[in-house]
Amino acid sequence: MARSARKSTKPSARNGSAAFAIFNRFPMRVWLAKLRDVAAGLGIISAVSFTPQSIVERLPENGQEAFAIATDIRALLVDVAGDTGTWLGDLLGSLADHDLEVPASIKDLGAWLPEFRLPDLPELPWAEPKAVDGKTLPTTAGSFSTAKDYLYNKVYFDHRETFYCGCRYSDKGAIDLGSCGLTSLSSVSRARRVEAEHVFPAAQFGQSRQCWREPKAFKECSKDNGETLSGRDCCQRVDPVFEAAHNDLINLYPAVGQINGQRSNYNWGMVSRGERFGECEIRIDSSIRRVQPPADVRGDIARTMLYMRDTYGFRLSSQDQQLYKAWNNGDPPDAWEIERDKRIKAIQRHGNEYVENFRKL
């Protein structure tokens, strides 16, 4: 029946909805007290779930499991909160539609309940953004291990799926190969763990840096025993641009370890043959050092590569740029890519313009 055709007479107790009957059966103050207690308890659980991973790892196994449960509850609350808000809005709307005399305590329900919201993603606890050659770099982690901690526990805490193949993984980084058609890799230990993958390979942007090619030229890269750090480690120590790019969460994605290793530092592109992995659509042709990603992540890759070019001045060939423009246009950002960028921006104070203001190139 159309809204305008509804009768304005008040419904009797006999034909009132179940929701109204429940409200009439118990005093309003009892409902409000219970809701207040539940909200407070859930708020405490959510806050506890944000305890730094470095602290959680020191706890006994049962303590770590408790924190994992708290994290799962927090993720569930994100979905429940939206549904509850819709239900409450519908309920109050129904009361108004039936012209019922709604108690003031219901109308002012928000004032009775404590403000409940999930804790904000924390800002990185390290140095202020650095300016190099007139460019302000994102506030990225001071070490790769810290970057991974934020990737897994702050960005993907409620979206534990690998990037290329959509494999589910646990809070401890163990991959469920059966969830993504990769059971053929079950005997490979590296395939059973999640790894942080650089979409723009560190080796590609590192090889243009002197610290990568000649670490011996930097006294800061000499160990006390006379040995020299690797090019990667040396650049993280002496090159702020490389350090920021290497630990930038926008360029990091969770991946199946074995596929991360097989991808190596190969470039992106289309291939006519190559190694395949179960039901995952990624294809790697080592003979030409090229990788063809699944169609549903090509836009994500393109926007990441273009972001790295713009943010750090890394070079891309004209052929690659045309490819990434085509991928960007053919695979616009989905809801998760947009949410991922928001979370990273809350941490690093710097998002990906190609995601935030998507346009066809």
Image (cartoon, rainbow, N blue to C red):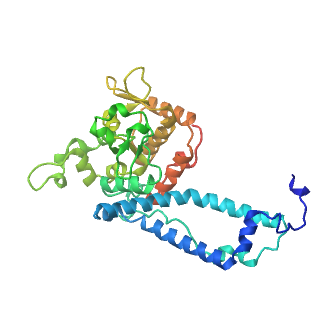
Considering every residue shown, the one lying at the far front of the view is 14
Q: Residue shown at 20%/43% (left/top)?
A: 214
Q: Is residue 332 left or right of residue 5?
A: left
Query: In the figure, residue 77 lies in which quadrant?
Result: bottom right
Q: Is residue 103 left or right of residue 295?
A: right
In which quadrant of the rendered image does the C terminus lie? Answer: top right
The answer to whether residue 265 shows anywhere in this view is no
In the depicted structure, whether residue 140 falls above or below residue 193: below
Q: Residue 53 or 151: which is nearer the viewer?
A: 53
Which x, y percent locates residue 189? 27, 39
Q: Residue shown at 49%/66% (left/top)?
A: 119
Q: Residue shown at 52%/33% (left/top)?
A: 327
Q: Residue 120 or 39: which is nearer the viewer?
A: 39
Q: Residue shown at 75%/78% (left/top)?
A: 104
Which x, y percent locates residue 347? 44, 59
Which x, y percent locates residue 120? 49, 64
